[in-house]
Image (cartoon, helix red, strand yellow):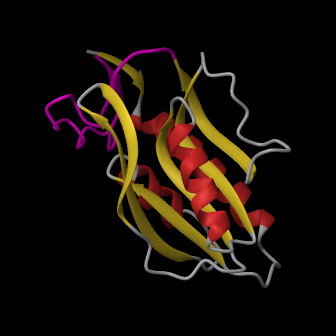
Amino acid sequence: MIELYSSKDIDIKTKIIAQQISREHHNDSTPVVMVGVLNGAFMFYSDLVRNMDIDVECDFIRVKSYSGKERGSIQLTKDVETSVYGKHVYLVDDIFDSGETMRFLAKYFNIKGAKDINVVTLVKRARNEFNPVGPHSFISSFRHAFECEDEWLIGYGMDSNEGYKRNFKSIFAL
């Protein structure tokens, strides 16, 4: 196991992103809904929301796209309970890998009538050159704290193949 990102580095990057989002919506009367993508994003999501200084609605969604380390079809297993119609939606996830999950969720929240859809991830795969913001996308903005290679990541919400190690404070590569 190799530590890639320390808890201190994660804390600093998370606070920076939280303040960027807060500044963008400081005088905006349109509600902001922060949607955590379960299970991997729960730690990043809670720290991000806790460091924002604007009022936000909080909700969670769960999609499944992996079985162990194997990618499968995307399945919605838990929907949000908050109405997102006419609101700024921020999809908060642990990792932006292929982009398929975010494409699926952006299309889904567009159908639900979100004013705009923004993606915030803790980590982005460096090899992924897919730009989620574009003319044929429903995504208005994309932020990420770190970039990584093709390592399997654990810690800070991300789990091992067996479903463990989410509680580590730093992020490690296996």
Q: Position of residue 99 (x, y in %)?
A: 57, 36
Q: Residue furthest front?
A: 73
Q: Position of residue 22 (x, y in %)?
A: 70, 65
Q: Which of these two is toward me, 13 or 124?
A: 124
Choose top left, top right, bottom left or bottom right for residue 71. top left
Q: Tell me which segment is drawn in magenta.
A: 149-174
> In the image, what residue occupies the spot 40% across and 37% down?
7
Q: Tell whether 45 sits left or right of 172.
A: right
Q: How many marks?
A: 0
Q: x and y percent of residue 136 in the render? A: 80, 44
Q: Depth check: 172 or 11 in front?
A: 172
Q: Which SS type dominates the magenta stretch?
A: loop
Q: Quadrant of the C terminus?
A: top left
- Compared with 35, 173 (above or below) is above
Q: Is residue 93 visible?
A: yes
Say above or below: 11 vs 54. above
Residue 130's x, y, as percent?
69, 28
Residue 72: name its quadrant.
Answer: top left
Q: Is residue 166 magenta?
A: yes
Does 124 sit above or below residue 19?
A: above
At 61% from the left edge and 22% from the top edge, which residue is drawn? 128
Q: Is residue 144 left or right of residue 78?
A: right
Q: Quadrant location of the N terminus?
A: top left
Horizontal side of residue 23 vs 160, given as left or right: right
* Magenta residue check for 129: no
Choose between 148 and 101: the one closer to the eye: 101
Residue 89 appears in the figure: no
Could you tell me which residue is drawn at 70 percent across and 39 percent down? 132
